[in-house]
Amino acid sequence: MAQVQRMSRLMVKTLRDDPADAETLNHKLLVRAGYVRRTAAGIWTWLPLGKKVYENVARVVREEMDAIGGQEVLLPALLPKEPYEASGRYEEYGDLLFRLKDRKGSDYLLGPTHEEIFTQVVKDQCASYKDLPVILYQIQTKYRDEARPRAGVLRGREFQMKDSYSFDTTDEGLAESYALHRAAYQRIFERLGLDYRIVSAISGAMGGSASEEFLAPAAAGEDTFVDCPACDYAANTEAVTFALKPVEGAEHPAAQELDTPDTPTIETLAEHLGVPASATLKNLLVKVDGEIVAVGVPGDREVDLGKLAEHLAPAEVELVTAEDFADRPDLVRGYVGPQGLKVRYLADPRVAPGTAWITGANKPDTHAKDVVCGRDFEVDQYLDVVVVEEGDPCPACGAGLKIGRAIEIGHIFQLGRKYADTFQLDVLGQNGKPVRVTMGSYGIGVSRAVAALVEQSADDKGLCWPKEVAPADVHVVAAGKAVQTELALDVAEKLNAAGVRVLVDDRAGVSPGVKFTDAELIGIPQILVAGRRSAEGVLELKDRRTGEREELTVAEAIARLS
Ligand code: ATP
Ligand code: MG
Ligand code: MG
Ligand code: MG
């Protein structure tokens, strides 16, 4: 049986004041309530109370991953560079990657995410279609040298992620593995008590569902999203914001020049391209409100011109020349918003100054065929571009959109065969011929989820945990006198025996006022006080969130709380 946790023996030091450098609630409160301690910028120690919350989140994640057939593994965090060189990510990650050498001078890295290594594991372990599908996951420490590791455990340089990877032989299989994850994520975030939205991580205007993000609305969030108050429409305004960098020597066949008409509309454009307005554009680059942006459409992500046109009305499409980004030849930015976009140009970053180009109608000889992000362009970094305005009509129902901030708590992705191609991951198919495997990857920020919970649930008194993640169910407070301590310990033992998780504040020489303040700060959902009427065996139960109080006998308290 679990033990009653005693405050007198628990390593917890609460603070009255916020840490000087803390800007976000989770940073302030998790430090003040003694859950975490900063070791270095973006590097955190989980103290006993914090570790319990962290483990509760991890347990929920594990249970739901197991429920969809996920098999838990544990890969190393210290990794050889070769697999990441093979995928190109050793370079692509740039400064985000922690790189190191061993004593012999060989290169290593600390894993920021593990697609490469999981692909190798499956290549080694699975030989036949009969071995698939398989879903593997781990809950593990990740390393990213984030530029701005602020906001407490929200954005760490060392952080905990649940990452899973699905391996299928068919596209339908991948879609199914993706759907299983999506549903599991919904259950996880519901059980954790997080308010969240699912948004397409490539724009809604592109109609794709190949990647979606789970966003937890919170002021401290670093993502901007649009949310409809009247229906369930939500979208990430950063969805397709890419920085594209031309790759030297890349082929760029059949790009087509267009004389710049004054203010062409999307119809003008379609007409020029000789495609119906419902055609699909690839590698469409866009300027928004004078800012150079691009609807970077790497690889198989496509902009449906017809759909885009809907969103453009009454858009002005203005062709812009390469001179417009002459000062940043290596960088253009992309975005397709759900509504109200003012899309102003189409061009390609590699064309000579003074020429405007169309680079991508889905019609033979009118676009740069087979332009592939990663081969022809490198995705350099993501940048913020917000172009949707508060009150713009919702594309689904017309109500005025709200713009808010949110925390990315999860991300699911149909990768397809990118990594399987890199590592030649094939299994023997039913017909005896090799089949290339198709993959999905799926992440939840486990440590970040703790931060998101704080950002959403804390109040002016302190932390206020949902039951499922709280470090205990009941915080029993002994006001101080011997009879009160005796009653508190008695009820604590009985609750514990009934399977209730109890923390009892049995500290001697600490005033009742300090104990009550600490109990509110620590945020366990129920506070049970052995106070004034202890001699009669009567306790006071206080709901941490609502502040409602009632008096109960020991027997009543046990019946109520177990
Ligand atoms: P962000 O946009 O916040 O930088 P990301 O898109 O780079 O996150 P992914 O690569 O999608 O992150 O990783 C999967 C999940 O891991 C994210 O959805 C998030 O919950 C979590 N995560 C990513 N970076 C961090 C970090 N620095 N600290 C804590 N959690 C993180
Ligand atoms: Mg990131
Ligand atoms: Mg992100
Ligand atoms: Mg992400």
Image: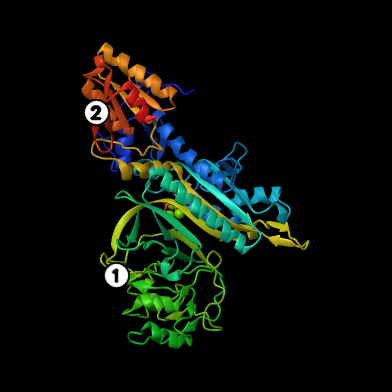
- Real-space Cα separation, disc 2 to disc 1, in angstroms: 46 Å
Q: Residue furthest top?
A: 482
Q: In terms of image quadrants, where is residue 531?
A: top left
Residue that label 1 marks: 393
In this view, 156 is above or below 539: below
Of 292 and 399, nearer the camera is 399
User: What's the residue type where badge 1 is placed?
Assistant: Pro
Q: Could you tell me residue 203's position as x and y percent?
A: 42, 66
Dot placed on the residue nearer the N-terminal end, 2 or 1: 1
- Dot 2, crowdedness within 10 Å: few (<14), some or many (≥20)? some
Which residue type carries mark 2?
A: Thr
Q: Position of residue 261 (x, y in %)?
A: 36, 87
Q: Residue 306 at what x, y percent from top left?
A: 43, 79
The residue tagged 2 is 517
Image vertical order of residue 459 relative to residue 68, above or below: above
Residue at 72%, 54% (x, y): give it.
Answer: 130
Residue 520 vertical placement versus 60 (above, below): above
Asked whether, in this view, residue 464 is left or right of residue 258, the answer is left
Q: Residue at x 40, y 19 (%)?
A: 493
| Image location of residue 90, percent across then percent down | 55, 52
Image vertical order of residue 426 relative to residue 398, above or below: above
